[in-house]
Every structure is written in C-alpha cells, then in structure tokens.
Image: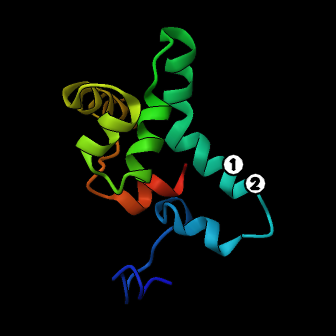
Amino acid sequence: MLEHIGRTNEIVFYDQMGFYRMLMAYENTAPMKRFADEVLGEIIAYEKKAHTQLMETMWTYFECDCNLQRTADKLFSHKNTVKYRLQRVEQLTGRSFADRFDSQGAV
C-alpha cells in the first residue's frame, strides 16, 4: 500500500495514512467512522450552527468531477457561491481539494 502512495522505504504511522486506513480495515467500520469524523466533523458541526449547504456542495462537486460550473448549474447557484463554499470547507477541514482522493474518501 505504501508503494502505491509513493512512500516506500519509510515508516508511516497509521494516523498519517489518511483514506488508506480504511482499506486496511474494511470489515471493521470503526476506522472509517473515525476518518469521516476527522475530516467531516467540523463541517457537520458548522452546518448545524450556521445552516449552510457545505456538505451538499462538496458532494455535488465530487459528483460533477470537480467542475465548478457544472456544480453550480446542478445546485442552481452561482459559480462564485460554489467556490466560496468549497473554500469554507477547506478552511474548516484543513484539507485541500487539490488532494481530491483523500478528501473524497471521507464522503
């Protein structure tokens, strides 16, 4: 697995493996839930307080292959609104959409 992510000949701790932790424990859902909580917990808490559409926007963004305009069209929103929401998700999670695989694995 480490070879796949380009980290051969080094020690990688379990909590540094991100999404790949789930592949190691697919029968045990606890690591999956823990990873989702790590990544999405802040967004969920924020949405409960601020009544935003961050999760829906993020999910739709992934469904639209990370295309801002298609996401905006699907959500009946302006492209800049979608961009702002995604930036807010990045701020809350401390993760970048540049690493799509890791971000999407939590959803």
Identify the coloring: rainbow
User: Which is more toward the observer, 63 or 3?
Assistant: 63
Amino acid type at mark 1: Lys
Disc 1 + disc 2, Cβ < 8 Å: yes
Residue 93 occupies which quadrant of the picture? Answer: top left
Element marked by disc 2: helix
Residue under the point 79% across and 64% down: 28
Residue under the point 51% across and 58% down: 105
Disc 1 crowd rating (10 Å Cα; few below 14, some 14-19, many 20+) is: few
Lateral position of residue 63 relative to residue 71, left or right: right
Farthest residue to the right: give it. Answer: 27
Lateral position of residue 103 relative to residue 6, left or right: right
Return the x and y of residue 80 as percentages of the image width and height: 19, 27
Return the x and y of residue 12 as percentages of the image width and height: 46, 73
* Residue that numbered label 1 is attached to: 33
Q: Which mark is residue 68?
A: none
Lateral position of residue 2 relative to residue 88, left or right: right
- Relative to 60, say whether 53 is above or below: above
Q: Which mark is residue 30?
A: 2
